Image (tube, helix red, strand yellow):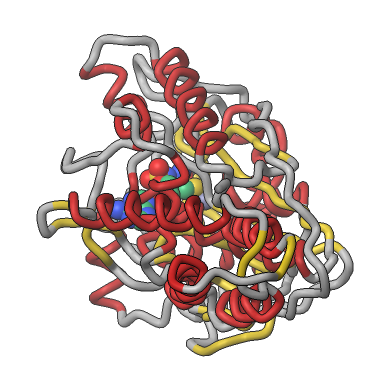
Amino acid sequence: MHAWPASEVPALPGQGRDPRIHDTATGGLVTLAPGPVARIYVCGITPYDATHIGHAATYNAFDLVQRVWLDTKRQVHYVQNVTDVDDPLLERAQRDDIDWVALAEKETALFREDMTALRMLPPRQYIGAVEAIPGIVPLVERLREAGAAYELEGDIYFSVESDPNFGKVSHLDAAAMRLLSAERGGDPDRPGKKNPLDPMLWMAAREGEPSWDGASLGRGRPGWHIECVAIALDHLGMGFDVQGGGSDLAFPHHEMGASHAQALTGEFPMARAYVHAGMVALDGEKMSKSKGNLVFVSQLRRDGVDPAAIRLALLAHHYRADWEWTDQVLRDALARLDRWRAAVSRPDGPPAEALVEEIREALAADLDSPAALAAVDRWAALQHERGGTDEGAPGVVSRAVDALLGVAL
Ligand code: 5CA
Ligand code: ZN
């Protein structure tokens, strides 16, 4: 699949610092100091509905990670998937009586537009589940040969008990895992499984559903977790720097992915850091396609909201916090954008070097974007109150805000 166009990232004077970021697996802050090429995999959308503010907030967090790395003069190898065949997509297509391929293409196209408008850096590889099937099948075959997978009525399941490290990403007790498995695509109540938590690797073809040639597995379609493992291992290899997603992916998705990879390679963990963004709510409940309490990025854009203001609204919340979208959040972001634009529209202003360092420091401290915004607010307030004589300072500020926060002033 093709991704979306990259917005340019201006180079800044000086150099950024290696970020410290919260890793779910170890439960603490880790320093992300990869080699010259940082490797990051961020779980992509299941394209059965438009991009909502919750998605955008999660992608914003991982966009910041990359901007910080770029500022440390590293290159970034970024991979993202599109779950373009899965139960929720097929169910929505059937409900709305449309072709599932057309639905996936339409929503993926809209996602690309939203990401472009929000100035999210594009992945180097943007890979659909369907196009990854030829790489998934041999992995499932290998898992079966290794004794980590078994068949149940034609479906192939992964055995969580084959992995001595199972549980070390999300650290949940058995009851919590079972509950979340049922909520998030698993089938813990299906009789005949070795362990209720075992996830499907390959689902045998069902009447009326799409299916693909699975060689020794028979016709069918891939499970969700193996999709991301296959794509990540194919393009990034084992031990990449960050696997990212919303906190709802810690279990089962990232836990199972780490397990699959451990069974395939004998190594743990697949990613050096498991990084999870908080959940955005609307009307007191997590924004979710299944509940329908959504604010779409594309709708806001159609309403004439400047994407830079949407981005500022996301940045005003720490990525790990759960927060609520309200009209006030958007009003505050619009007002801030106006203040900042006015402040950088003069030829000179208060010195900007210290501000660039403050933004760097804030982001390096577990992506503290609210602190970064507060630093720019202070500079803008100074500019409005007293001005300054540093020629070019407004240009430095707007380049820093663009390069590090993805906001075009
Ligand atoms: N295709 C899978 C990942 S492989 C998937 O979870 N797709 S998704 O469309 O449901 O979600 C895409 C990303 O948005 C995931 O990282 C998910 O954790 C995140 N996300 C979903 N809802 C919210 C929300 N309300 N707030 C923050 N992030 C969210
Ligand atoms: Zn994923």
| Picture quadrant where residue 173 is located | bottom left
In this rendered view, identify the residue nearer to me: 365 or 356. Answer: 356
- Residue drawn 62% across and 85% down? 30
Residue 287 in the image, given as x and y percentages of width and height: 23, 50
Which residue ends up furthest to the right in the rendered image?
36
Which residue ends up furthest to the left in the rendered image?
283
| Picture quadrant where residue 320 is located | bottom left
Q: Is residue 368 left or right of residue 329?
A: right
Residue 295 in the image, given as x and y percentages of width and height: 25, 40
Q: Is residue 189 left or right of residue 23?
A: left
- Residue drawn 18% across and 49% down? 327
Q: Is residue 224 visible?
A: yes
- Residue drawn 67% across and 45% down? 231
| Picture quadrant where residue 317 is located | bottom left
199 up-or-down from 323: above or below: above
185 up-or-down from 262: above or below: above
In this rendered view, identify the residue nearer to me: 334 or 257. Answer: 334
Q: Is residue 394 left or right of residue 311?
A: right
Residue 326 in the image, given as x and y percentages of width and height: 19, 53
Quadrant of the frame with the N terminus: top right
Q: Is residue 250 left or right of residue 286?
A: right
- Residue drawn 52% across and 80% down? 22
Residue 18 in the image, given as x and y percentages of width and height: 73, 79
Q: Is residue 225 visible?
A: no
In this rendered view, identify the residue nearer to me: 174 or 382. Answer: 382
| Marker count (numbered) | 0
